Image (cartoon, rainbow, N blue to C red):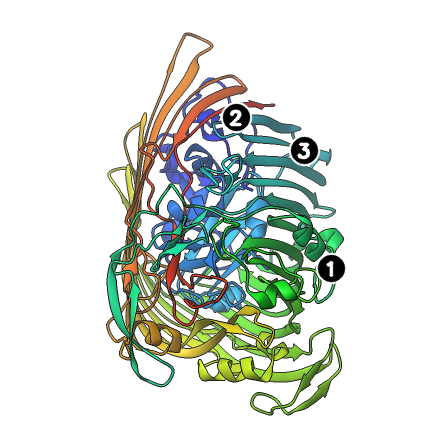
Amino acid sequence: MFALVAAASVATAITPAAAQDTTVAAQAEPAPVAQPEAAPETGEIVVTARKRSENILRTPIAVTALSGDQLAIRGATSLNDVANFTPGVTINNNAAGRNDRSFQQIIIRGFTPSAATNPTVALFIDGVAVSSPTAFLAVSDPERVEILKGPQSAYFGRNTFAGAINVVNKEPGNRLAGSVSGMVGTRENYKLHGDIGGALIEDKLLFRVSLDQFSKSGSYRNAFDRNQTLGDQKSTSGSAMLIAKPVDGLTIKAFGLLSQDEDGPSAQAQLSAYEIRDAAGNLVAQNQSNCTLTGRSTAGAAVSNPFFCGVAPRYNSAISPSANTTNDAFIKSFLANPTGRVVSPKDGVKGYGLLRRYYHLHLNVDYDIGDTGFSLSSLTGYNNERYSQLADLDNFGTTGIPNSAASIAAGGRSYFDYPFLVERVTRDFSQEFRASYDQNGPFKGSIGVSYLDSWVQGSLGGGNGGLGTTTVSVASGATKNDTLGAFFGGTYKFNDVFSLSAEGRYQIDKLYAYAPPLGLTLTSSAFIPAGTYAGGSQILQKDYKNFMPRVIAQAQVTPEAMFYASFSKGVNPGLFNTAFLSFSPAIQALAAQNGIKIEVAPERVTNYELGFKGRFFDNKLRFSLAAYYAPWRNQINAILFNATDANGVTQPIRGSANTGSVNMKGIEIDGTFNPVRQLDLNFAAAINDSTIQAFQNAIITQLSGLTNYKGKENPNTSKYSATAGAQYNGHFGGPDPIGWFVRGDYVFKSGVFSDAANLVRTPDMHKVNARVGITHGPVSIDGAVSNLFNNRAYTTIADNSVLTSNFRYSTYNSGLVVGLPDLRTFTLTLRYKF
């Protein structure tokens, strides 16, 4: 997690005049206590959006940079918080009937990815690729977070289709310095942080280590068990950095982090389009549908489907959120069974919730070759993540609905329940070599090569049958990507006004798929040739070759204002659908019928962008403005349906397909205003519009009857978003003053649609946070309240099937699963810096 507390309250104040030559970059020494006000947000920020340090206002890319102090003073503790404070960025945690931290889609400018395993946004720490958002949660007190919008293929490579997010670590100085902090809050919130850094050998060998622990109880009581809260989270992480400078010009930086997440059952509610009662007549799920759709059967006949239209209704708090989380003998037996698992039982969850372990290592080497202007860089990274998550997919808790006779005969419970286990293991290694030239002349540029080896394998299991006996997990075959890239980037400055940049990357993606660990026997050649494949043997291989250019024209019309125009192309790698190959021929036939093919081709985007950046009124006002148009073609979309096997066990089957074409366009503004020394204002807003040109999804068509989706919007993303903040700083006292601040932040996100039919969406979110604090010397204390007005707008929404013992409502989508927000939370934080 981000261990971010109100550090900004002890930073040295920066006057607007002095701010013109101030950078927010490397680690600063502890601030003098004579000026305890928070640093205004008008200080210059240096970013590395093009793998070199540049003033953000002279960087011709749409980039938002949030310093560690800015994140701290806003109370950001997660990647979701970063997204809230960045218009145009959305996080979706909702998939396959659950809403938790095991699934995180990062969405920039409305480019909704088909799955967490096929992202449209790439993540980096110090410019080194990381495999999942987990890494971001474990970075402690970063120097800054850079959010780059638009294709970033030339410098950042794979999966930067819609943008990239780079966390820059805080580096130690020669002086021994550190901090300890503790936070307590309502609903058993607490956060502990400690860090220390300094020189082992002055100017030659520096270090920094940090430890963090965070925990909170969920905001919601489980209607099935009122003694249990839903949404509990706990994270523990540690990181270490070592920087060596053995000779002039050579810098070697090693960084590593470890983290573990232990969460309870997640906080989501189910909205059902049908009424469900148990055998005694007690209400289990309320019929909350407000419209009836004329859908289509698989044979094309018209059918009536109760569903939801407009804004999703409030859930019935008397019966929801609810989940059967009883850790009985059936669950213990199931979780002790290693069959088909990719995570061994000893390393997996021991009950309902999430257990995730992650570690990341990287080594950056930079060498400046004397006064030649040439430099050489090497970036090496390794990531390893494994998670295990057990959820109650029927999303209601009851023991009153009898189980099916077949499930009881198989050794299942006497009552209906649907526990489901999802596990995944991800490993990757990356290497980049880069040569750069910058002699402060008209030309600067770089050239390099990169390599990425990524490996992923998952498993699924559970249901209403004989848990731990006949019903076990099914491990899918692993997939592997070998990505080779060669890239270049150069900028030529013709005069004091005009410059031109040309960049590009030639990339070869080698995609492999392997048979499941227990082998694979196919009696049909519908997807791959029939036959028997040994466990772990290669069954598919495909190469994709692409060139992704970017050209930027930049005009520095005055020393304080800059215009730019850019053209770029992005390619998101293709993928294989292999998980369903382990199921019966009948289920494979259903997969084909629902539009799932074995190979999914790459998706492509062309991005046209205009931008303006500037500062005015003696640097009191700074802002950037960007407008873009981006045709997205061969769009990859998710396809999810339920299939029942010969034993009567229903399994959720998920795949992807090239079913879409969307025109993306939008406008974004981001700025700060510092009218007087004591007052800091920040503002940002975005309109990210998506217009579907073509789309296919048999499941959505069966539900809605729609076959023409032209003019609809992409799901799971806000079209309108904005944030605004105000902070007033002051001090009182004589020669040993006490500094104080008061701050408020407002976040707005418009509602998001559940699917491409645009039938139902979440309510708009309006969230207000407030914080007040004081600082005296090295000690600071602040109190905060998040979600001040207890806004209950759903954070996410997804179509879902209501599960019952006879699965009568599973043919079509028959409900919604909505993510529930954290409610009003009070916290008190104490920090000591030395």
Q: Is residue 566 visible?
A: yes
Between discs 2 and 3, the one toward the N terminus? 2
Disc number lying in front (1 or 3): 1
Q: Is residue 675 left or right of residue 133?
A: left
The one of 403 and 702 positioned closer to us in this rendering: 403
Q: Is residue 133 left or right of residue 37?
A: right
Find out whether the residues at labels 1 and 3 contact each other: C-beta distance under 8 Å: no
Q: Is residue 569 left or right of residue 652?
A: left
Between discs 1 and 3, the one toward the N terminus? 3
Report the residue at 53% width, 82% height from top. 599
* Residue type, numbered disc 2: Val
In the rendered view, tell whether residue 652 sits above or below residue 557: below
The one of 495 and 235 positioned closer to us in this rendering: 235
Q: Residues within 10 Å of mark 1 (few under 14, many from 20)?
A: some
Find out whether the residues at labels 1 and 2 contact each other: C-beta distance under 8 Å: no
Task: Return the residue at label 2.
Answer: 184
Residue 291 location, quadrant: bottom left
Disc 2, SS: strand
The one of 667 and 700 positioned closer to us in this rendering: 700
The one of 142 and 511 positioned closer to us in this rendering: 511
Q: Residues within 10 Å of mark 3 (few under 14, many from 20)?
A: many
* Residue type, numbered disc 1: Asn
* Residue type, numbered disc 3: Gly
Label number found at residue 677: none
Label number found at residue 198: 3
Disc number lying in front (2 or 3): 2
Looking at the figure, which quarter contains the C terminus? Answer: top right
Q: Position of residue 199 (x, y in %)?
A: 70, 34
Q: Position of residue 697 (x, y in %)?
A: 38, 76
In the rendered view, tell whether residue 653 sits above or below residue 417: below
